[in-house]
Image (tube, grey):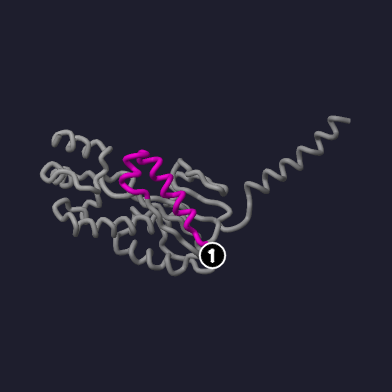
Amino acid sequence: MPSKKSSKVRPQLAQQVAFVWDLPGLVAGVDEAGRGPLAGPVVAAAVILDDLKPIRGLDDSKKLTARRREQLYDEIRAKALCCSVAQASVLEIDTLNILQATLLAMRRAVAGLRLKPSKVLVDGNQLPVLDVLAEAIVKGDATVPAISAASILAKVTRDRWCAQLDQQYPQYGFAAHKGYGTSEHLAALRAHGVCPEHRKTFAPVTQVLGRNQ
């Protein structure tokens, strides 16, 4: 008798598990921009696409020209069911570390969506803490349209931020290198020191601060 009872329970449990993990509903793609640079916030975006309004040409933002990213940025904002862009500040990056700050920005982006997704697909191999089902997908920005859209929104948003910072601190060349540790940026750091938007816990910036103390 016990064996018969347990054999009846197992299929029911299997069905419940399958139902939970294949939950129907809205799917959001999430990606970030700005983990590697020496300055500025890390930006994350979350996008729920509209199947009735397809967007052609979505891809990993790094594979697209700046002009094409700008075009797709406007199209995504116009056609997506909803989207959200959030960030974690330089202070948060220096306090938490870049990984935790990135996950924080992703969590904020998902929380900012007007519609609540039933599942979130995140580029990479790390997941933020969310109150919905989530899956990490390595190279998802090149294979999952919603993640591609999120990568474009995040990249364009951060590039625009760098262009504004360049007007405030033209000596560093932020509009050109976007905060990455290029030879030009490192030379500017040595010549002009650190500005308030530099990440003080990143090695090249820490070294400059150490020399100036």
- Report the side of 75 relative to 81 (left or right): left
Q: Position of residue 102 (x, y in %)?
A: 39, 45
Circle 1: residue type: Asp
* The stretch drawn in magenta includes residue 25: no
Q: Is residue 78 above or below residue 150?
A: below
Quadrant of image for the N terminus = top right
- Report the side of 42 relative to 38 (left or right): right
* The stretch drawn in magenta includes residue 89: yes
Q: Position of residue 189 (x, y in %)?
A: 16, 44
> In the current view of this chain or complex, which residue is farthest to the top?
2
Q: Residue at x 45, y 65 (%)?
A: 55
Q: Which residue is mark 1?
A: 51
- Give the main secondary structure of the magenta stretch: helix
Q: Residue at x 17, y 37 (%)?
A: 208
Camera-side residue: 184 or 189? Answer: 189
Q: Dot 1: what SS?
A: loop
Per the rendered image, the range of residues in magenta is 88-114
Figure label count:
1
Quadrant of image for the C terminus = top left
